[in-house]
Amino acid sequence: MTTTITILFFGIAYGMILYLISVGLSVTMGLMGFVNLAHGVFAMLGGYATVTFMNRFGVPFLLALAIGCVLVAALGFVLERTLYRHLYGRSELDQVLFSFGLILVSVAIVRIAWGPLAQPIHLPDYLKGQVKILDITLPAYRLALVGFGTAVIAGLWFVFDRTLFGARIRAAVDNRAMAQSIGINTSRLFAAAFGLGTGLAALGGGLGADVLAIAPAYPLQYMVYFLIVVAVGGLGDIKGPFVAALVIGLSDTACRYFLPEAGSIFIFAFVFIVLIWRPNGIMERR
Amino acid sequence: MKTVSASPIVHATMPSGIIRLLKLLPWLVVAALPLALPGYEPLATQVFVMILFALSLDLLVGYAGIVTLGHAGLFGMGGYTAGILSVHGITDPIVTALYGMIVAAVTGLVFGAAMLRTKGLTLLMLTMASASLLYELANKATGLTGGEDGLQGVSFTPVLGLFPFDFRGKTAFFYSLATLFLVFTLVRALINSPFGWSLRGIRENDARMAAIGCPIMQRRIIAYVISSALAGLAGALQAQTTQFVALYSLSFELSGNILIMLILGGSGRLYGAFVGVPAFMFAQDLLAKQDPANWFLGQGIILIAMVMLAPGGILGIAERAVNAIKTRRGA
Amino acid sequence: MRFAKMIGARLLRQGAVVVAALTLALVALIPAEAQTIKIGMILTYSGPDAALGEQIDRAVNLFVKLHESELPPGVNVELIKRDDTGVNPDLAKRLAQELVLRDQVQILTGGQWTPNAMVIAALTKEAKVPFVTMTAGGSAVTLQSPYVVRTGWTLWQTSYPLGEWAAKQGWKNAYTVVSDFGPGHDGEAAFTKGFTEGGGTIVGSVRIPLKTTDYLPYFQKVKDVNPDVVYAFNPGGPQATAFMKAFDDVGITKSKIKLIGPLDITSDDELPNMGRSALGVVTLGQYSPAAMRQTNIDFVAAWKKEYGADSVPTYFAVAGWDGMRAIYDAIKAQKGKIDPDATMKFLRTWSNPNSPRGPIRIDQAGDLVQNLYLRRVEEKDGRLANIEFATIEQIGDPWKVFNKK
């Protein structure tokens, strides 16, 4: 029983990281229809920012995380305004190539600035070691991760379901032309959504630095997972990717525990079958 | 008003026989490389294999309009097939190359039939997932594939029983060049056939093609299978000319690289592969030696610049330049 | 006046010609033409494991710098370095091919990873170029060709005696956790053999893919099974730290479960990053920079002088250092004229009583016979170090012993 709970816990933690990073991608892809493979770059930059502020400038963990998010969100906003917006109407191939090029450029810059090694993350003492809850010992860091992640996700859902901003995004995702005709400034909306999405990715990257190591190869190594979450969860949705991320996090972790010989085979086979069965994502909104 | 007439001189007088001979010329020049630059045969062989691989990708990306980030899956299937067969006693190069093609084609059929019903991000995702699946399978099947260590003990008997694969790489050079030539003529014929034209039509507007009765799914699957077979052939060639198969042949990195190589030259233009692959490998040799970071940076900037300013790759730029000159002359 | 100037100019010109001619004559008269021995070195200079390649590279550079005067007169050495970017056998093969065909190297070295070293070694069979592999740990490497020797170690060397020792400690069951590639398989097999021969039982084993970053689920299972001892192996460097942290996160380091392994898991350069979670870990290895042998003290002093007081040479560096020692000795023995077969004959009887790791020699199989030391991670002078507490003398590669045909 304890084993099941521990596995459940690890899997949820992993899934939450994936979700935080990928939800922004789902929204922006659904909104702008842009195949942005480079989304992982923002998560990576968030991780680097957090780690650098902590290690180099001695900033406490949470504050470093916050600063990282804000910086990356600003960067995302700027990039959307300057580069991405010119490519909205282009072919899928062009978008793929562009975002791939963006990945390569950022990988190179990061490598030149921080070197090729994974960044060590020195957690604050209150996050180190284990915590005992009802007879089960769990790593404190992962526990904090789940707690924090839940809070952020709840906040995100609130914004989406209850605020005007969220409503506008949902409208534009459903029918962009219609949304524009009722006066929604989609251009500004895109920029704001992109900033939000990249900020969230940065949060995921910084929080998840222990699970997805912060190294120059980050956007390439984990791209598949982010895209899986979005493709399986569905574009433009924020609840679908949550389910997808949890399923992926749980099954990957369970697999590693019970069937280490299977490796990541299970995940890809699973994704394949799901996408064949439900090409638009498991929530099947459209 | 003076009408602009098609330039009269160029097409009329050259007999087609001479034109065909002229088209053979670059091939003959390349075949003479070992005389001019001895020691470069292994590199040249690698270039030929990659061109073959890029040609197979062009069928999909450039002509059928199917964007895939998982083509290395088929390449690796062909490579591992040839390699594993050789380790278990079947060592004739041509036989194992054929088996490699068949296995890759079947893989392409199975995955393609499932994937090609989708499009957009889903299709892209599926191509990546299928290749990743194959990669992980090969990684885990260490007894069969060698896993991370690569497939050891790969060796092949002489080509046609006459030309052994020597350490200097001369046999590999001519063998891969000849294979490339054969495949090239095949692909060219395919492109210019009604089938090839129907592919272009499907790429441009599949709704209309369906309206005129073209069986879209069937055509796309056929294109995918042919492309897979050719990719598998390239993979088998790689195994035979390097006497080794590594997990890299199934990797996402290779899928990405070959796409970049093709786009750099220009997709949908038949010769794009021939231009893009050497350009890429040359640039890689130049930049990656000093610092791999510089190589990534260069690649990324070129890609972004190409998408924003020069779609169509090097050949696209050349085309526009030629057209510009032509219009200046004609008007 | 102008006339004098003209004569002066002419004299100057003629003088210059005479000086030039004399210089040319002197140059032509220099007895042996300067002989350059080209050595091709394939290491990992980029990517996450570049730190390991850097250790070897630094040792090689330092050796060449300090031993220039040892070379026969007129002979100098040119190192041609190539980057294999990590575990990349096909790239390594092509690099080696180009080094031999294009650059015409007479000796190959480096060979940091077993998969890479395997293909380079196989190549030397046909190319007939001596290959001194420095740190590849797979036993099979020296079997690939008669032109290969190694100056590092093998996993059987560092894991089989460890298994025997673990059984002698009274531990009854063990769990093996290794990275999933050649040396990892070797380590797992070697430890298992040693441990089970001593009466122990292996209660579980797992092979972790090389590219994994999240070890927790694997290690959680280990903790749940609760063995007496865990045998772990990873390629060292940053991965060693990640391993150690994960063990700590799951609570193994604080529990009664003992953690042991070959020296890679407590890489000296990573010890500061591992922190207190590494205290008490016992490893078996051929080199620790904390050793008190005079030859080592001198070596470490020379290293710190060149690379800074905070820099620490690891077993990777020593492998590179000893590799160059062997190569230089081979060059000296042949007075600068490298013949492949003569070189191999020399190397297979080569010995060095003064290596920083203690006396070493290469045996007929091409493997390195050396002392192995049991060490424990302790705090010394405020820093963590691998402190040797027992010696196993002069072991070759056990696998070759068990698999004698």
Image (spheres, coloured by chain):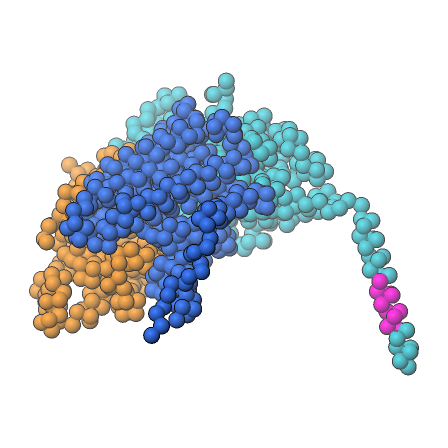
Chain colours: A orange, B blue, C cyan
| Picture quarter with the N terminus of chain B | bottom left
The residue shown at (35%, 30%) is B99
Q: Could you tell me residue C182's position as x and y percent?
A: 42, 33
Q: Could you tell me residue B76's position as x and y percent?
A: 36, 38
Which image quadrant for residue B194?
Answer: top left
Q: Is residue B107 left or right of residue C66?
A: left
Which image quadrant for residue C205?
Answer: top left
Residue C15 painted magenta: yes
| Picture quarter with the C terminus of chain B | bottom left
Our reading of the magenta stretch's main secondary structure is helix
The residue shown at (70%, 35%) is C333
Q: Is residue A254 left or right of residue C139?
A: left
**Vertical side of B52 occupied by C118: above or below:** above
**Vertical side of A168 occupied by C366: above or below:** above
Q: Nearer the viewer, residue C333 or C277?
A: C333
Task: Give the extent of the magenta segment.
Answer: C8-17
